[in-house]
Amino acid sequence: MAKVIMIQGTMSGAGKSLLVAGLCRIFRQDGYRVAPFKSQNMALNSYITKEGLEMGRAQVMQAEAAGIEPLVCMNPILLKPTSHTGSQVIVNGEVRGNLSARDYFAHKTELIPDIKAAFRKLETYADIIVIEGAGSPAEINLKQNDIVNMGMAAMVDAPVLLVGDIDRGGVFAQLLGTLMLLTEEERERVKGLIINKFRGDSTILDPGIQMLTERGQVPVLGTVPYMELTLEDEDSLTDRFDAKHVGKIDLAVIHYPRISNFTDFDVFEQMPEVSVRYVTNVRELGTPDLIFLPGSKNTMGDLKWMRQNGLEAAVKRAAGKVPIFGICGGYQMLGCEIADPDSVEEGGQIRGMELLPVRTVLQKEKHRCQTDGTLDAVEGIFSGLTGCEFTGYEIHMGQTVYCNGYGSGAKGTVDKVAGPANGAENVVSDSTGRIYGSYIHGLFDKGEIAGRMIQTLAREKGISLEDGVWEDYRTIKERQYDKLADTLRGYLRMEEIYGMLREARIS
């Protein structure tokens, strides 16, 4: 039976995900088999395991920190919002259907056996399991039949560390207020408090920490400084969408309402002199060197959004002048048509952007698989990518085929699969060699792919970049996990945290 510890927060965005990742890294460095767990995650950034099962990317990041293969039992329930009031419900990596928030709330306790089974399976892999909560345990409207915060802690008898975010202000009220709103039994589970994201001299907090300890009757186990880390954050709260800096090489990502898997572009954010901007209107688009159309949870709806606000027309005007690259849903949008005969999204059919000679038919069954290999016969401006090794995964509804007579450079026949599914081409391009599409998420992460793309864009502009050699993104992340662990060791009372583990689940 694995030892367990749980990180809960006073609010969404308090830093739970990164603290879980940091603890996973510390325990791994200290010689333990460790794994992350989150019973229920709500996110549009998802990942496909080797078994073809879908899980949230936050637990994938934490598994990387722990040095183990991501397993779907680390995240048994994934909710992918399809609207403001409903989500696709994924249980143990498989789609169960779409539910409104009210219906899911009414039936979520039926999933407790799935949560317990996933946790028991994870115990066969790990000595220590670090559990992440969601939002706050003091959200009164969600406390009934809770399965992700104190309800989860009770299921596995986990000690809890409660984290507050001082960067947003009011951290003492956050922590004390949360404790006050917990039941006596729940308060007894909270064994330590953590103040997160502090900037400056932490000694000025000493009077507040003393008061917090006296009134809350829970020790403060550390004040963690604000860290500049290049690791994935919770997609609904990321601040990367606010970046407006324009670098020597400027990449624009269309930020539609149901954007998904924008982690595909994280690798470019690590490159000096490269900017990644997420744009929501024509004014913000400007004159980038490359336009990305990312994945979407509602491809038809997001294409209509682009059509209505003028971004589609702006992207089509840019075609031929700058490269345009669509991934997954963005790839589907670039084609001649998207048909939805089974009402997977909105039903009917919609004209695409007519920039790639492909047509997509949405289907009820979600295609999920990992994929790797070498890029074959990439044409046009990015022909230098031909032969590069890649590793990634596919996750999409529907099949895309070549079609004749639409857009520029139509090729092949209507029944030939376009894209990496079923062994077909992994990157599809038009006859101009400046419009590209692929179903592969994570396409740019491995080896030299991203670096070669940036060097190509620099040559097109007639400029040179200071640092022409870039590392594999996975190597960069490994250093970030070590930096995170080193920082937490310096600011958390780890001996007391280990003491909680020794006392947990003895019976």
Image (tube, grey):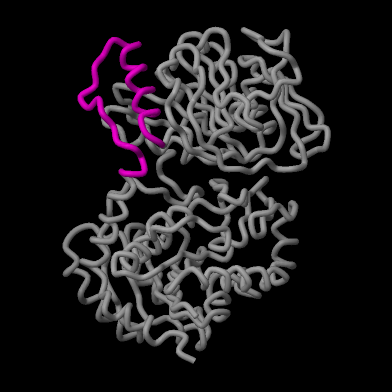
Residue stretch in magenta: 446-475
Report if residue 468 lies within the magenta region: yes
20 relative to 389, above or below: below
Give the left or right position of residue 121, taking residue 417 as reference: left
Give 40 or 426, whichever is nearer the viewer: 426
Q: Residue at x 50, y 18 (%)?
A: 378
Give 372 or 232, whichever is nearer the viewer: 372
Where residue 219 appears, x then y in whole percent? 31, 82
Give 450 or 296, whichever is nearer the viewer: 450
Q: Residue at x 29, y 69 (%)?
A: 30
Give the left or right position of residue 203, taking residue 187 as reference: left
**Quarter of the image holding residue 121?**
bottom right
Whether residue 212 is visible? no
Give the left or right position of residue 227, taking residue 204 as reference: right
Give the left or right position of residue 165, taking residue 140 as reference: left
94 relative to 105, above or below: above
245 relative to 458, above or below: below
Q: Residue at x 62, y 32 (%)?
A: 329
Where residue 318 appears, x then y in whole percent? 50, 13
Whether residue 274 is visible? yes
Report if residue 358 lies within the magenta region: no
Query: Of all residues shown, which one is farthest toward the bottom?
Result: 507
